[in-house]
Image (spheres, grey):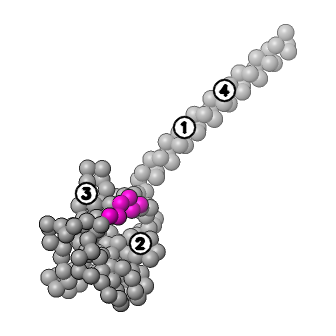
Amino acid sequence: MDAQRQLYHMTTSWRLLSLLFALSACLLGINVVVLRAADTISPEKVIETEGALVISDGSSKYIFCKGGRFESRPVGISGRTMRGYWERNKDGQFVVVVLLGWVNGLSGNDEYRRIVFSIYDIYRESQPKRTASQPKNPVYSTYFLIEEFVRIEKPEKEIWSLDKLPLNQNGL
């Protein structure tokens, strides 16, 4: 009988320990999820509060300005430029219509593209610290995908041009 009681107590202890472990893991997981959700900021919130969201893939900067203006510049001294406008689609993606150009090279005046960006939330700790020497809109670290990049005909909506903008709009 003593062996059966010991086995029963050991089994019960293991069951309780397993239950406590599972409960702890669930509670810890819920806390982690809640903390991670609280640590992020949406791209829309950055655009609304900062005036623009600037992201980069390492070779280009993509600039989504408040009011729907879009611009892309090379990180280096030469490369592709894009200027146009962005809107959100029903899936929450950023749909951009642009005119392509080139810095330090020849470019046509009729190369239009539609680009679809999926931009995910930005972790608050990745927000750059501001210093006096930094531009108004620093580059944010976030995960994004270019879901589509296709040639299109000239859009009906006019693409903005540099000569129609006030200097240093949005500090860019």
**Three-letter amino acid code at disc 2?**
Ser
Task: Give the secondary structure at mark 4.
Answer: helix
In space, the residues marked 1 and 4 are separated at their CA atoms by 15 Å
**Three-letter amino acid code at disc 4?**
Leu
Name the image quarter holding the C terminus.
bottom left
Say which residue label 3 marks: 88
Say which residue label 4 marks: 16
Residue 33 appearing in the image? yes
Q: Compare marks 3 and 4 and give the one earlier in the sequence.
A: 4
Task: Give the secondary structure at mark 2.
Answer: strand
Magenta stretch, residue numbers: 145-150
Instruction: State which mark lies toward you, 1 or 4.
Output: 1
User: Which residue: 68% across, 30% down?
Assistant: 17
Say which residue label 1 marks: 26
Q: Compare marks 1 and 4 and give the one earlier in the sequence.
A: 4
In space, the residues marked 4 and 2 are separated at their CA atoms by 51 Å
Residue 28 position, x and y percent, is 55, 43
In space, the residues marked 3 and 1 are separated at their CA atoms by 36 Å
Residue 66 appearing in the image? no
